[in-house]
Amino acid sequence: MKITDKHILYTLDTNKNNGLKLLFDRYYKPLCVFAIKYVYDLNLSEDIVQEVFIKIWEKKEFHTQMNLSAYLFTSVKNACISYLRKEHPLYVDSFDDEVIWGDYCTEEEILERNRKLMDTVENLPEKAREVFKAVVFHNLKYKEVAEELNISVNTVKSNLARAYRLLREVLDILVSYLL
């Protein structure tokens, strides 16, 4: 059975623990990958997404008619921009206003972007892809990845940097194309 956003919202209202788990399982990784587009740092993107989840946890009620996906991605985008404004004000000033303040994406647009992102990840060179997935999707430490793949920690770091560089190049093109 496919769990819908409406079901997640209803569960958040009736059983916050289960609702948050459903929300986390469905959106945590895509939101982290989305946040990287703004802050270019995995740990920071995870922190920002976790802060958004905490705000959701503290929210008293949810309307089952709201567009959950758009709400989450917009919340993460705004949290990233707030962080950048506070920590790197000159960097934020250099953003194109249209990119930051453009209309909200529809759920279909967000899903399409996520699909293209995942396709891009799958097209990374083999070692870079393995390292990226282990670190980003499985939350493994560099040392754990090195042991699992039988490579050095420095090789893990260089492959991860390569993956990020390639993703950034493709995503810059993708963002320009989609906007």
Image (cartoon, rainbow, N blue to C red):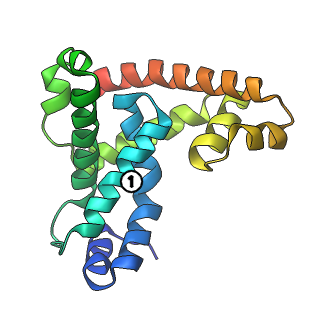
Q: Residue furthest front?
A: 87
> Residue 30 appears at what percent x and percent y?
43, 47
Residue under pointer 1: 50
**SS type, badge 1:** helix
> Residue 126 appears at what percent x and percent y?
72, 30
Determine the image quadrant of residue 109.
Answer: top left
On screen, residue 2 above or below 131: below
> Residue 170 appears at what percent x and percent y?
46, 22
On screen, residue 122 above or below 107: above
Tell me if 77 is positioned left or right of 98 in this view. Answer: right
Question: Is residue 179 something that shows in the picture?
Answer: no
- The residue lying toward the viewer, choosing from 129 and 123, is 129
Determine the image quadrant of residue 130.
Answer: top right
The residue shown at (51%, 40%) is 118
The residue shown at (21%, 68%) is 59
The residue shown at (16%, 43%) is 104
The residue shown at (37%, 30%) is 39
